[in-house]
Amino acid sequence: MPSMLVIATTAVPDHLRGALSRWTSEVVPGIFVGTVSARVRDQLWQAVTETVGNGAAVLVHPAPTEQGYAIRTAGTRRRVPIDFDGLTLIRMTATPQVKSEQSPP
């Protein structure tokens, strides 16, 4: 049975955006919404995870959970979904620290 999904992408290759737009509508840049079967959803997500590169992506789809949805992520993100007693919560990770080089006196 088809169900709705939302895929949000950041800095992904153009060919991935094209592949996603075959099955979904890009309602705003990087946000894809569609109604597809679980098989198509899983195949789309596999394509995303294999080609996300330096970008990032998030998939939200219905699931038999307390919240009624599941979250999957690919790529490097500051927000990481974690399971907390059956609820999906979002943990924020620290921003990477950049070492600054000091010039000689």
Image (tube, helix red, strand yellow):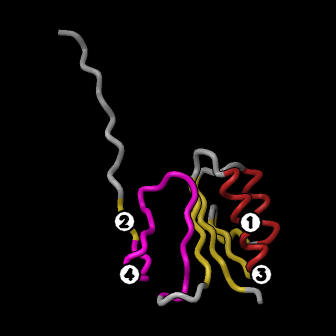
Q: Which of disc 4 and disc 3 is earlier in sequence?
A: 3
At 58% from the left and 45% from the top, the residue drawn is 54
Residue 63: image location, x then y, percent: 59, 85
User: Marks 3 and 4, Cα distance to the nearest angstrom?
Assistant: 28 Å
Q: Name the residue under label 3.
A: 37
**Residue nearer the viewer, 15 or 92:** 92
Relative to 16, 28 lies left or right:
left
Relative to 11, 66 lies left or right:
left
- The vertical placement of 62 against 21, above or below, is below
Q: In which image quadrant can residue 73 be found?
A: bottom right
Q: Name the residue under label 4.
A: 85
Q: Name the residue under label 2.
A: 91
User: What secondary structure is marked by label 4?
Assistant: loop
Task: Check whether the beta carbons of the residues at disc 3 and disc 4 lie within 8 A of each other.
Answer: no
User: Marks 1 and 4, Cα distance to the nearest angstrom?
Assistant: 29 Å
Residue 17: image location, x then y, percent: 73, 58
**Residue nearer the viewer, 82 or 29:** 82
